[in-house]
Image: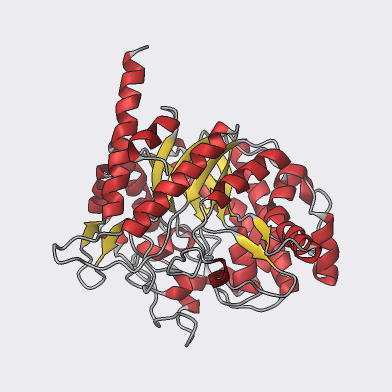
Amino acid sequence: MTSDQDLHLQFPPAFEWGVATSAFQIEGASTEDGKGESIWDRFCRQPGVIADASNGDVACDHYHRLDSDLDLIQALGVDLYRFSVSWPRVQPLGSGAWNEVGLGFYERLVDGLLARGLRPHLTLNHWDLPQALQERGGWATREVVDRFTDYALGIQQRLGDRLAAITTHNEPWVVAMLGHEQGIFAPGLRDRKVALQVAHHLLVSHGMALKALRGAGASARLGIVLNLAPAYPATDSEADRARARLDDAKGRRWYTDPLFLGRYPQEAWNDFGGDVPQMREGDMDLIRQPLDYLGVNYYTRHMASAQGPWDTRRSGLPLTEMGWEIYARGLTDLLLTLHHDYTLPDVYITENGGAFPDALGPDGAIHDADRTDYLRTHIAAVADAMRAGVPMAGYMVWSLMDNFEWASGYAKRFGIVHVDYETQQRRLKDSARWYRSLLEQVRGRRARAVGER
């Protein structure tokens, strides 16, 4: 294993380090200061859909603790902070009137980051669509594509001059498949045809927004974030190898092929049959807008079996609290595959981390050795990919702090900062101290590099 002392030496001084969150998971203040209802606000009210019957009404109370949380981020020694805007907080109905108080919150957030020497990476859509738009059909309708473009331009007008990066969508696969095919995420629908139409509209809206933002003179770097996993055959049988190829086409390539090649993978299109999305002329050209960067969220690999879903326990690898295999090599393999298949822009790891059963020790600290090891091995996997020629630009830990983990509620903790949900006290876990130490070594190399010029 790569030692801590050697790990920082593998990254150039320009490589950026950060932490990430999303609005619904940390902000709380769900009905305050003119904020509208989101699909996740509504979804959480349905009995049985959230493991601990919780919701995002308070979450980490970040809305009321902004300055101290920004101080916390600065104290970690990172370069950037990836966050999302709650669309219904700034435009309660998803169209029409803007909410000045909500916009003011994000202005304070962005200005607070800049004052602390941190680069703001803003995500426009991290799943919390205004409920008012869902009631008009949501992402399954073409209207929301236009509304999203208007929303992107509104954020650009208000904040764009101070942003380092703008991401259109976080993990469109999750919105489409978990929200509209499996129904385990908001809005809780179960219709594959609708899900594939949603996926298409998300990609089209991404392209339309990038085109509009560039037309408006956006100075921020523009991109999209995808959750991706390499697909491995469960055995060496031809049936399992074929299943891995098909799963890769229906998962990873259903999003990356349109973005980089301007087409959907034919084998997936054939397999989806009559459920494939309706398209308009010019859609694929819209989707294939030039990217300034690609964000990759990686947590685990995908095992493909012709016999049905793979039981992750069969591999014998350690699992996170989510039941996901810990397989850092998969991140290198994924990045190398992307590098082989496409001409890539800069690549950021925009989310990477693990949920583990954290507990306060007798000394009042959280000794999360499993998480520290997870981060160390995955950062080393990024270094391996970079040495092989992948244009890596940065790495962001998921997550800054424990938060509302969607359908898992508050039962799963991904943060490098512990949150006591009763008192809202924040405590650095050992993983946060390790990450800060790593970045201190990186900063030392940067300072020496500057001094040698």
| Quarter of the image where one finds residue 321 | bottom left
Q: Is residue 242 left or right of residue 114?
A: right
Q: How many marks?
A: 0
Residue 32 in view: yes
| Quarter of the image where one finds residue 335 | top right
Q: Identify the image quadrant of the C terminus.
A: top left
Q: Identify the image quadrant of the N terminus.
A: top left
| Residue that sits furthest to the bottom in the current view | 47
Q: Is residue 279 left or right of residue 158?
A: right
Front residue (pair 179, 125): 179
Residue 182 place in picture, x, y as percent: 63, 76
Front residue (pair 168, 178): 178
| Residue that sits furthest to the top in the current view | 453
Residue at horizontal 38%, vertical 62%? Answer: 414
Colour setup of the view = secondary structure
Residue 348 place in picture, x, y as percent: 52, 42
Residue 377 place in picture, x, y as percent: 44, 48
Residue at horizontal 55%, vertical 46%? Answer: 295
| Residue that sits furthest to the left in the current view | 363
Residue at horizontal 34%, vertical 69%? Answer: 357
Q: Is residue 46 above or below residue 114?
A: below
Residue 272 place in picture, x, y as percent: 81, 68
Q: Is residue 270 left or right of residue 30?
A: right
Q: Is residue 449 left or right of residue 95?
A: left
Residue 152 in view: no
